Amino acid sequence: MSSHAKAAWIAVDWGTSNLRIWGLDPAGNAVAHRISDKGMGALSRDEFEPALLELIGDLLESDGTTPIIICGMAGARQGWLEVPYISAPCAPPGIAEATAVHAQDPRLDVRILPGIMQSDPADVMRGEETQIAGFLAENPGHTGTLCLPGTHTKWVALRGGRVERFRTCMTGETFALLAKHSVLRHGLSADDVDQDAFRKAVTEMAAAPQALAVELFGIRAAGLVAGLSPQAAAGRLSGLLIGAELAAVRDEFDFAEVCLLGSDRIAKAYQAALDCHGCKARLLDADTITLSGLALAYSHLSVSSHSGARS
Amino acid sequence: MSSHAKAAWIAVDWGTSNLRIWGLDPAGNAVAHRISDKGMGALSRDEFEPALLELIGDLLESDGTTPIIICGMAGARQGWLEVPYISAPCAPPGIAEATAVHAQDPRLDVRILPGIMQSDPADVMRGEETQIAGFLAENPGHTGTLCLPGTHTKWVALRGGRVERFRTCMTGETFALLAKHSVLRHGLSADDVDQDAFRKAVTEMAAAPQALAVELFGIRAAGLVAGLSPQAAAGRLSGLLIGAELAAVRDEFDFAEVCLLGSDRIAKAYQAALDCHGCKARLLDADTITLSGLALAYSHLSVSSHSGARS
């Protein structure tokens, strides 16, 4: 990887909190992989192009245009350009459904991929559809459950390579708010999570998910009167919330075959929680899969460009 | 009420966020009722006496001592002086269980009432036990369910005038965090709550409490793709959370006879939610009941002082 290499095209995953890019050479090898904190949430509309140029400027050829394929929140209402959702059930969107953005800089050929919406029950995703496309590139025609863990975890039912339905759980965001800002913060370890307490809480929620509301404050009370350790308290809070999530989705999503698109601490927590339900879930690297999905879109852009050039 | 009247004794409800006092004359009439934001959470140990004096200094007789009866978080570990809990099942504590605090100012005769703890399941209260004492003063020997709504709502099973067991739900705090800091904040009315959406959500949670984790993000999604109004979103969030709480406590607490110690917006939301469960709960004024509980403690202090003087 040379810092002076130019990119044949650039893959962009523009989340709410972060902006992540890969510069790719013609063979599909990454010549650059960079991250900035200029996520959609930090930007007004006219700040998107400068934020992108700041991160990729040195990767651009000075003559000609470089294709930029973007997934995620850049296409949201508060993003660079609102890109309409496609509707589930559907195959994940490809380059044909992408929207071109008019950039000020003539070196940029920007396309934003759409997200997926669902009417009933109402749900939305932006970014995960491209990970799903990446997963399906490796697993064509797959049928089974995907779980994409994160601040807002997505559960996706795939059937024959199509997104049949999906649901979002804001468990990660709820955990962060309760752990940092609620009364529970007083007795919670930030780093060290007791796995036994985690698994016990998941199992409790599997048996009695309706008890969540009384068990949350119970963590604080057990710290005060029963000496619950900060490690056990952190494990219990995480286990109660992820356990309640699994109890909420288990009737809608088949736990017999779950692939987790993630390999970080959160993904491993979901894997451990699924194990309590007797499900051995596979962990897959989310970064690799995101790039696969963007590369798939780019491959069809190239074909359609060549077609265009031939006609 | 004269601003120059002195108090025969002073009742204090010292919460986490606020400090509230009543100055009472010998007949038990309030000569002052004041509130400050110097709750326990804002004070270090040596700031309690100055915070109290700031609020009550002009009510004190210059010669002699004035009894100060305190309930709430002044007795917590982070409070003025840690006062050990008494253990449920028990009658609410009275003045005999109070702990005297040595104050710097000789005009102050300070007593802090203890809270109540429960070992299994672990739970704690500080302040509510005095409201329960006040309620029982009006309803001696009562059997039934008390609900004390607030940031941390308490559910209490009373049997023959004793606290048989209780549970705490941090629903109010969770609602505030989700409404102000989560992704849900984007589509939520702060003031205007749609009652139909509230009742529908409570009813849904009564039937399927395990669905909470998927329904939360659904509020945001319905705002994006189905035009859910901010008023309906606020009603739905409140209804889902209070509905989940009722589903959590209904097997432990008898809904046939519920008294709500509160008359504010939160108490009315609980009343409406209980109505969805077919329960007609009574609303009682929490301030009046808190003062009744503190006055009950003072009345026994007076008796024991008189006894002491006679012996």
Image (cartoon, coloured by chain):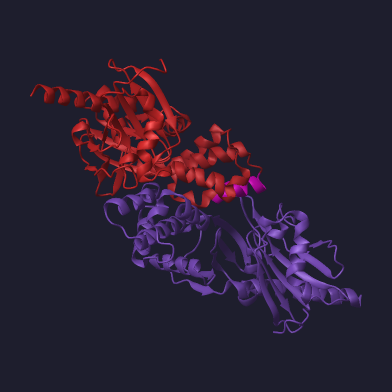
Chain colours: A purple, B red
Answer above or below: position of A7 versus B73: below
Residue A68, located in which quarter of the rendered image? bottom right
Asked if residue A69 lies left or right of residue A283, the reply is right
Position of the C terminus of chain B by quadrant: top left
Left or right: B289 as drawn, with respect to A52: left
Residue A238 horizontal/vertical position (percent) = 43, 59
Q: Is residue B2 magenta?
A: no
Q: Nearer the viewer, residue A97 or B71?
A: B71
Expressed as whole percent of the image width and height from the top left, the position of residue B189 reads 60, 38
Q: What percent of the width, then of the height, locates residue B183?
A: 59, 50
Occupied quadrant, residue A3: bottom right
Q: Can you see residue A155?
A: yes
Please name whichever residue, A39 or B55, is drawn nearer the observer in this view of the structure.
Answer: B55
**Most frequent secondary structure within the magenta stretch:** helix
- Residue at 36% over, 66% down: A194
Quadrant of residue A87 in the image?
bottom right
Q: Residue furthest front?
A: B63
Magenta region: which residues? B217-226
Query: In the picture provided, is A281 more to the left or to the right than B10?
Result: right
Residue at left 52%, top 47%?
Answer: B178
Above or below for B176 versus B267: below
